[in-house]
Amino acid sequence: MKIKKITIAALMVAIISAPYALNCADNADQDTVAKTKTYGSVEYYNNDNQKKNGYVVLDFYTSWCHYCKLLDPVVKQMAAKYPSIRFLKVNAESYKAITKKYGVRGFPTVILLKDGKLVKRKAGFMNATKFTSWISPYAST
C-alpha cells in the first residue's frame, strides 16, 4: 500500500513540475530574445540607456503563479507583434522595490509606461486577443 502512495505522489510531483521545467527551458533563450531589444528582463532594462524613451510593458510575475506561466507566451507573442514597445519581465519575488513602487499585489500584473510614467495597468491573465485590444492603441506597428 505504501508503494502505491509513493508512486502516486511521485507522479503528482512530476505532473506539477512539468510546467516549471518548460518555463526554465523557455528562459534559456531569454538572452537571445532580449537581444532584439523588445523583450527581456529587468536587468536588461536597467542597463539600457534608452529605457526612458517610448512605451514599456512591465510583466510582473512570480515563480509559483500558474497564470503568470500562461501569460508568458502571450507576452512574447505581443513583443514580436509590436516591436515599437519594450516588454520586460519583472520577478516580483526578486525585485520587491519595483513591485512595491507600482503597487503590484496580484499576479500576473501588466503595467504600461510611457517615458517612465504609468499609462495603464491590468491585473490577471489576458489571452492574446484581449492583450492585443489592451496594447494596440499605443503601438505603432
Image (cartoon, helix red, strand yellow):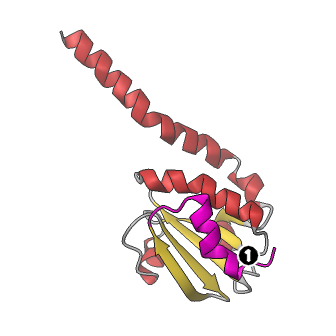
- Assign a secondary structure to mark 1: loop
Which secondary structure is most common in the magenta stretch?
A: helix
Name the side, left or right, on which 80 lies relative to 121. Answer: right
Q: Is residue 17 above or below residue 103?
A: above
Count of marks placed on residues: 1
Residue at (38, 68) in percent of width and height: 106
Q: Quadrant of residue 10?
A: top left
Q: Is residue 46 visible?
A: no
Q: Quadrant of the N terminus?
A: top left
Q: In the depicted view, which residue is nearer to us: 120 or 33?
A: 120
* Residue 32 image point, x, y percent: 77, 53
Q: Is residue 45 above or below residue 74?
A: below
With respect to residue 110, does 93 lie above or below?
above
> Which percent across, then down, holds residue 79?
71, 64
Residue located beneath label 1 in the image: 48
Name the residue type under label 1.
Asp
The question of residue 45 being in magenta is answered with: no
Residue at image coords 66%, 45%: 28
Q: Could you classify mark 1 by the number of other residues whose Cα lies within 10 Å: few (under 14), some (14-19), or many (20 or more)?
A: few
Start and end of the magenta stretch? 124-141
Q: Is residue 39 visible?
A: yes
| Residue at position x 75%, y 81% in the image | 49
Residue 14: x and y in percent read 42, 28
Residue 120 spot, x, y in % from top left: 54, 83
Residue 133: in magenta span: yes
Please identify the quarter of the rendering in which residue 17 is found: top left
Name the residue furthest left: 1
> Looking at the rendering, in which quadrant would you find the C terminus?
bottom right
